[in-house]
Structure formats: structure tokens, C-alpha cells
């Protein structure tokens, strides 16, 4: 994702490129809000949309000129938008607030998805036996240093990483193929 | 160069999934995701794959189900009917029993392991690995091995957070084996050692209170359960109910110190 292209498109009012870029950035912001701040999907979607509108406005006002700063600006604004949303909710329905876990540091479990897991389960079952054994060992022992895994499988540490990335790539490819079916 | 940078980021993703990154590193990683959203797909795949593998590992640790012949179900149904009839016959209005409020068996999910998917400023250490292995041993039905591993953490890595976690886990195993006196000692050690973890503190006091009830030490149990209640965490509601029951049984029905409105 090239943010200088995004800035140029905004300044040139190139709507097609803006839409294209917004479609790439929006899911990242939504996931950022759900994982990092435990926002609900609905809140995250609203905040991501507001964030992009604000950012486009700022770029047009020449307040963000450096494309590298755009990413920081997007994350910071998304965070502020979400907190604003939360304080609005608090005024309307205070009773519901304790259910929000905004004090928790990180919610990677928000990336879990039943449909994804069903497909990935099939992908794992279809792995070559040694790949399957490898990835199972890797995740069943999250506390092990890579050197311990490497030692267990009789390979070097760098090969241990390569093998892990390879298995994940195979699973990712498999997932992408199956989700399209 | 490009490839080595990607490898570096993928190692960071692995560390993120395992809860080994600092806040700063996590934020840097999200900047990478914004630059290359495909890496976010990798993160999602890893999180889901890890979950599948962990669930499978948990599932394989479960007891096998033995099918019974069909006549046993008829016999069981008849027995249940007979028991119901007897209960009806001898039923009197009885007050609630203490064991309705007491934890019968502590789920393995309550065990403390390394810090999982949560971000922490610590890396996975040998003590973390031993705690994780202890968890695995329990899931595999090998409680004695788990106790050895937790004792190893206590003897070799008696510093926080490992000491409090190991004692808590030891207490949980002993509680489930009905070794309440030893469980009480372990929960007390956990509660005394814990620093900066409301969760561990809450579990230690809650299960300590439950263990004390099991040996009939109701006054002391009440104090421990009240400590858990005050921490306002996940055990607040059951702690409140148990406190009411304890106060009632101990002849003290003054609950003014509890915040009843939010719980009822």
C-alpha cells in the first residue's frame, strides 16, 4: 500500500484511486480497532469510515503532507474516533459500558472466525504429514524458543523459521483457494 | 533485502501471536500491516491456526466415551423415576445447600500459563515453558507430572509472576483431587506472592475460599471470598452469592457492605 499514491489521489480528486485505496485501508483500520481496542464490528466500521473522511479532509487542507505520517494519523484518529464513540454510548446507555473490555491490552482472539477455522481445519488435514506435525508442534509449544523446535526436528534455526513460514504460506494459499469456491 | 525484512516481520507476527511483543513493537507491527495488508492476512491465518491446534490438543486430552448397551438407558430411566418418587415422598422444604454455591471442579482454563495472546513486556522464559508444560500435562490427564512441573517452577523460579502462577496451578490440581488442606496452602502462597495481577489474586482468593468451605472453615472462607469479591472481577457475582450464603449460615445477615444493586 503506497500512501503517497493515496495522498496524490486525494489532492488530484482522483475518485477511482481514492476508492481503491480506501477499500484497502478500511479493513486494516477495522481490524486495528477490534483487536487493539476491542471495538464492536459496528463501532469499528463507523469509526474507520469517519477516520478516512477526516484524513481526506486534512490532506486536502494540506495539513498532512508527508505520506509516512498518514499511517500514524489514521491510527491515532481511529483511536480518538472510537473513544468519542464510547463516550457518546456512555451518555446514552451507561449500563452497557462495563461489558466493553477497553482496559484489556490486546484482543487477538477477535480475529478468530468460525468459517475461517472450518476451512483452515480442512487445510491442516490436507497438509503433508511432516508439515502438519511441524505446525502442530510449533503451536502446541508456544513457549519454546525456535532453537528448541529446530533441535527437535534436527534442523537449523533459520530453516526452522523458513519451514514455519512455508507451512503458513501453504495454509494461506489453501484458505484463499477454498474461500473462493 | 526485501525478503529478509519480510522474514523479520513474520517473526514479529509469530511473537505477537504468542504474546511476546511489547506495546511499542505491536504498534510498529500494525504500521507494517497498514503498509502491507497482506501481512495482516498472515496474522489472521496464524491466530486461527493456533486456535485450531490448541482446540485439537484439548480435545485429544478428553476422556474417551464408552457406549453403553441400550438396556442400561431403560434401567437408568426407571431408577431416576424411582428416585424422583422417593424424593417426592420424603420432600421437606430445605434451605439451599452450601455445595450449590461451591465450585465442584476447577476447569483447566483457570490454570495460569505464559501470557498467551496478550501483549506483555516480557519474553517467554523457561518458567513460562514449564507452566505451559504443566497445563499440557493436566490436559493429558497427568496431574502428577503437572505437580512436579509446578514444583520445579516454585523451587527454581520463585519470582513473580511465576511463583504465584505455579502455586495457583498447584492449588487447582490439589483442589480437583480433593486435597483441600494442601490446596489451601498453595492458594495462600499464591495470594501472598502475587504482584500486579488482579486476575491471579482474584482466582487465588476465590478458590481459597472454596477450599476452606470444603474443610468447614467458614469464617476464614468468608474473609477469602470477600477478598475475591472486592476485586470486582469475573468471580464477583458467584462470590456475592457465596458471601450471602456464608453470612446466613454464620448467623450474620448484614450485607450492607456489598453492592447488591449491581448484582441482583
Image (cartoon, rainbow, N blue to C red):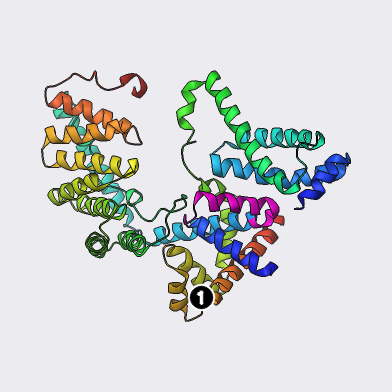
Residue A77 lies, in percent from the top left, at 65, 36
Confirm whether the magenta stretch covers residue B257.
no
- Displayed quadrant of residue A87: top right
The front one of B243 and B57 is B243
- Left or right, A50 with respect to B95, comes to right
- Displayed quadrant of residue B232: top left
- Left or right, B58 with respect to B257, comes to right
The chain to which mark 1 is attached is A
Viewer can see residue B103: no
Q: Quadrant of the C terminus of chain B?
A: top left
- Displayed quadrant of residue B101: top left
- Magenta-highlighted stretch: main secondary structure? helix
Residue B202 lies, in percent from the top left, at 29, 40
Location of residue A75 with respect to A169 vertically, above or below: above
Point 82% across, 49% down: residue:
A5
Location of residue B133 with respect to A22 vertically, above or below: below
Residue B95 lies, in percent from the top left, at 17, 25
Q: Quadrant of the N terminus of chain B?
A: bottom right
In the structure shown, which secondary structural element does the residue marked by tag 1 occupy? helix
Residue B15 lies, in percent from the top left, at 51, 59
Q: How many marks?
A: 1
Location of residue B231 with respect to A131 vertically, above or below: above
- Left or right, B120 with respect to B37, comes to left
The front one of B112 and A140 is B112
Q: How many C-alpha atoms fall within 10 Å of the one at disc 1: few (<14), some, or many (≥20)?
A: some
The front one of B3 and A96 is B3
- Left or right, B58 with respect to B92, comes to right
For disc 1, the marked residue is: A157
Confirm whether the magenta stretch covers residue B30.
yes
Point 36% across, 63% down: residue:
B129
Viewer can see residue A28: yes
Range shown magenta: B19-39
Amino acid at each position: 500500500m503506497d500512501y503517497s499514491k493515496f495522498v496524490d489521489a486525494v489532492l488530484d480528486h482522483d475518485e477511482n484511486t481514492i476508492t481503491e485505496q480506501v477499500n484497502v485501508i478500511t479493513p486494516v483500520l477495522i481490524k486495528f480497532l477490534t483487536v487493539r481496542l476491542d471495538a464492536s464490528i459496528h463501532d469499528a466500521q463507523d469509526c474507520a469510515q469517519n477516520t478516512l473522511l477526516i484524513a481526506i479532509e486534512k490532506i486536502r487542507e494540506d495539513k498532512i503532507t508527508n505520506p509516512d505520517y498518514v499511517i500514524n494519523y489514521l491510527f491515532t484518529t481511529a483511536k480518538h474516533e472510537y473513544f468519542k464513540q464510547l463516550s457518546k454510548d456512555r451518555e446514552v446507555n451507561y449500563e452497557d459500558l462495563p461489558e466493553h473490555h477497553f482496559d484489556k491490552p490486546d484482543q487477538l482472539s477477535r480475529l478468530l472466525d468460525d468459517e475461517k477455522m472450518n476451512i483452515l481445519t480442512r487445510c491442516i488435514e490436507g497438509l503433508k504429514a511432516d508439515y502438519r506435525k511441524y505446525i502442530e508442534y510449533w503451536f502446541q509449544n508456544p513457549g519454546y524458543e525456535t532453537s528448541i523446535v529446530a533441535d527437535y526436528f534436527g534442523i537449523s534455526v533459520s530453516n526452522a523459521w523458513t519451514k514455519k513460514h512455508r507451512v503458513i504460506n501453504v495454509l494461506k494459499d489453501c484458505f484463499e483457494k477454498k474461500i473462493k469456491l | 533485502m526485501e525478503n529478509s525484512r519480510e522474514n523479520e516481520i513474520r517473526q514479529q507476527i509469530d511473537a505477537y501471536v504468542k504474546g511476546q511483543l511489547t506495546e511499542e513493537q505491536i504498534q510498529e507491527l500494525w504500521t507494517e500491516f497498514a503498509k502491507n495488508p497482506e501481512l495482516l492476512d498472515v496474522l489472521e491465518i496464524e491466530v486461527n491456526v493456533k486456535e485450531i491446534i490448541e482446540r485439537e490438543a484439548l480435545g485429544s486430552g478428553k476422556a474417551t466415551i464408552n457406549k453403553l448397551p441400550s438396556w442400561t438407558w431403560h434401567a437408568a430411566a426407571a431408577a431416576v423415576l424411582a428416585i424422583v418418587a422417593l424424593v417426592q415422598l420424603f420432600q421437606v422444604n430445605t434451605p439451599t445447600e452450601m455445595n450449590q454455591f461451591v465450585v465442584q471442579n476447577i476447569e483447566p482454563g483457570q490454570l495460569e500459563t505464559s501470557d498467551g495472546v496478550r501483549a506483555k513486556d516480557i519474553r517467554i522464559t523457561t518458567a513460562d515453558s514449564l507452566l505451559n508444560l504443566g497445563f499440557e500435562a493436566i490436559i493429558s490427564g497427568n496431574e502428577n507430572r503437572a505437580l512436579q512441573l509446578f514444583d520445579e517452577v516454585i523451587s527454581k523460579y520463585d519470582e513473580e509472576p511465576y511463583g504465584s502462577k505455579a502455586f495457583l496451578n498447584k492449588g487447582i490440581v490439589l483442589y480437583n483431587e480433593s486435597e483441600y488442606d494442601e490446596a489451601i496452602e498453595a492458594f495462600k502462597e499464591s495470594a501472598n506472592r502475587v504482584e500486579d495481577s488482579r486476575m491471579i489474586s482474584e482466582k487465588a482468593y476465590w478458590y481459597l475460599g472454596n477450599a476452606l468451605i470444603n474443610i468447614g472453615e467458614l469464617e476464614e472462607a468468608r474473609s477469602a471470598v470477600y477478598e475475591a469479591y472486592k476485586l470486582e472481577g469475573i468471580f464477583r457475582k458467584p462470590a456475592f452469592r457465596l458471601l450471602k450464603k456464608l453470612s446466613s449460615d454464620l448467623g450474620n445477615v448484614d450485607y450492607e457492605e456489598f453492592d447488591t444493586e449491581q448484582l441482583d
